[in-house]
Image (spheres, rainbow, N blue to C red):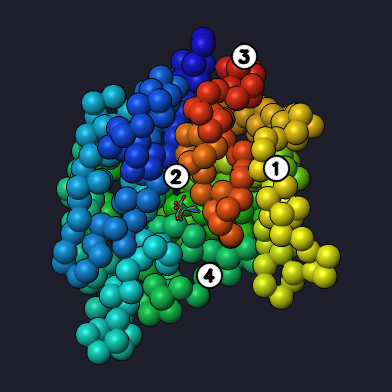
């Protein structure tokens, strides 16, 4: 094989997130890579609730429609991201016209409306939905989101039921980050196993896999694959990237140290990644893909969160103006050396 999707054809889908430039085919080079290398796609932003329903009852589907058209035209496995998430949700969702927090019944009804409208529109076309994103914290407790605070734990069950009713054939997923943190792994596994015990249809759990060079360990990720797959659901790698930059959290807010220098800490490689770092990055990709291949019977899809390094959200989070190298293709959309290594491995 000479391209990723061929190499991994009998193992799992190999996917990428698409931004608006790519969905609307404004960048022929990037789109060329997408068509040539990947057989699964997910929209990076345009199917989040703040974009799909910016005001109550006013849906904006142009970008999402184009995404689905692109996927159909190119015969791709499509995932909808994401129906219920505390982030990138419009404020109106949680407040009435006076700005007062809505009641439980009102929020449930808004959830129902949103999920039903969106999932029905793409019924039979979108294969699976990230129904709920990021509901559990790293310590395994429930995130105190508006959904949780106003509705209680049942918001997840309700979201899955609304989605299932709107498209009974669609696969339904729970998606989260840092799933290799033991307490979080356990919290997610307990939450999903409760859902299954209540008869809720859950087809898979997405591990986002936004990694760093030194964290998490492959061993902890493996424990997560096993723990999730033991629940009887499929496991997916949904948003993979590997930042080469120093851990951002270390330098946020009060924790900024006296010797902090912005350039060195926040943007150490503006003109290219040193060979030593390239080796580390490639090593990490190889280690994780080896793990995914080892568990190919449990893993249905591996999706990276963007096509070229220049597209990556990692360049702008938690601060803008970083130059990161977290993906498989460079800023010119040329394959990085890791692509050939992965193809060989498969
Ligand atoms: C990110 C996008 O990549 C950015 O463009 C956007 O500004 C913020 O969201 N977890 C998720 C994704 O589930 O939806 C997030 O995507 C990255 C973290």
Q: Earlier in the sequence, mark 3 or mark 2?
A: 2
Q: Earlier in the sequence, mark 2 or mark 1?
A: 2
Q: Secondary structure at mark 2?
A: strand
Q: Which residue is mark 4?
A: 142
Residue farthest along the top direction in this orientation: 1
Q: Nearer the viewer, mark 1 or mark 4?
A: 1
Between 50 and 253, the residue placed more toward the observer is 253
- Secondary structure of the residue carrying tag 1 is loop
- Residue 130 visible? The answer is yes
Q: CA distance from mark 4 to mark 3?
A: 41 Å
Q: Is residue 119 left or right of residue 157?
A: left
Q: In 3D space, how far apart are the residues under numbered discs 3 and 2 (Cα atoms)?
A: 28 Å
Rounded to the nearest whole Å, what is the CA distance between mark 1 and mark 4? 37 Å
Which of the two discs, 4 and 3, labels the residue nearer the N terminus?
Answer: 4
Q: Residues within 10 Å of mark 3 (few under 14, many from 20)?
A: few
Mark 3 or 2, closer to the camera:
3
> How many numbered discs sit on the rendered protein?
4
Contact check, label 1 and label 4, Cβ < 8 Å: no
Q: CA distance from mark 2 to mark 1?
A: 37 Å
Residue 105 in picture, x, y percent from top left: 26, 79
Check contact, mark 3 vs mark 2: CB within 8 A. Answer: no
Q: Which mark is residue 204?
A: 2
Mark 1 residue crowding within 10 angstroms, few (<14) / some (14–19) / many (20+): some
Mark 4 secondary-structure assignment: loop
């Amino acid at each position: 094989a000479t391209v990723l999707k061929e190499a991994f054809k009998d193992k799992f889908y190999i996917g990428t997130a698409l931004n608006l430039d790519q969905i609307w085919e404004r960048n022929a080079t990037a789109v060329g890579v997408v068509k040539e290398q990947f057989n699964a796609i997910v929209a990076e932003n345009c199917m989040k609730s703040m974009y799909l329903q910016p005001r109550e009852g006013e849906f904006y589907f142009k970008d999402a429609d184009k995404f689905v058209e692109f996927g159909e035209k190119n015969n791709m496995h499509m995932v909808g991201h994401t129906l219920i998430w505390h982030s990138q949700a419009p404020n109106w969702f949680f407040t009435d016209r006076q700005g007062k927090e809505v009641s439980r019944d009102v929020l449930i009804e808004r959830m129902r409306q949103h999920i039903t409208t969106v999932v029905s529109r793409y019924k039979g076309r979108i294969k699976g939905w990230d129904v709920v994103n990021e509901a559990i914290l790293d310590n395994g407790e429930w995130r105190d989101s508006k959904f949780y605070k106003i509705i209680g734990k049942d918001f997840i069950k309700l979201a899955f039921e609304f989605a299932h009713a709107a498209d009974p054939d669609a696969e339904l997923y729970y998606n989260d980050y840092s799933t290799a943190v033991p307490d979080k792994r356990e919290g997610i596994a307990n939450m999903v196993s409760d859902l299954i015990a209540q008869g809720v249809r859950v087809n898979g759990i997405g591990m986002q896999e936004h990694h760093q060079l030194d964290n998490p360990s492959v061993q902890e990720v493996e424990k997560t694959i096993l723990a999730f797959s033991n629940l009887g659901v499929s496991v997916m790698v949904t948003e993979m990237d590997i930042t080469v930059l120093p851990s951002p959290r270390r330098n946020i807010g009060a924790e900024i140290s006296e010797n902090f220098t912005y350039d060195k800490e926040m943007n150490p490689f503006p003109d290219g990644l040193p060979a030593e770092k390239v080796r580390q990055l490639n090593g990490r990709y190889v280690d994780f893909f080896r793990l995914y291949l080892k568990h190919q019977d449990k893993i249905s899809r591996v999706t990276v969160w963007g096509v070229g390094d220049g597209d990556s959200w990692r360049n702008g989070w938690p601060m803008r103006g970083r130059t990161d190298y977290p993906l498989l293709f460079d800023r010119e959309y040329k394959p990085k050396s890791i692509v050939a290594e992965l193809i060989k491995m498969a």
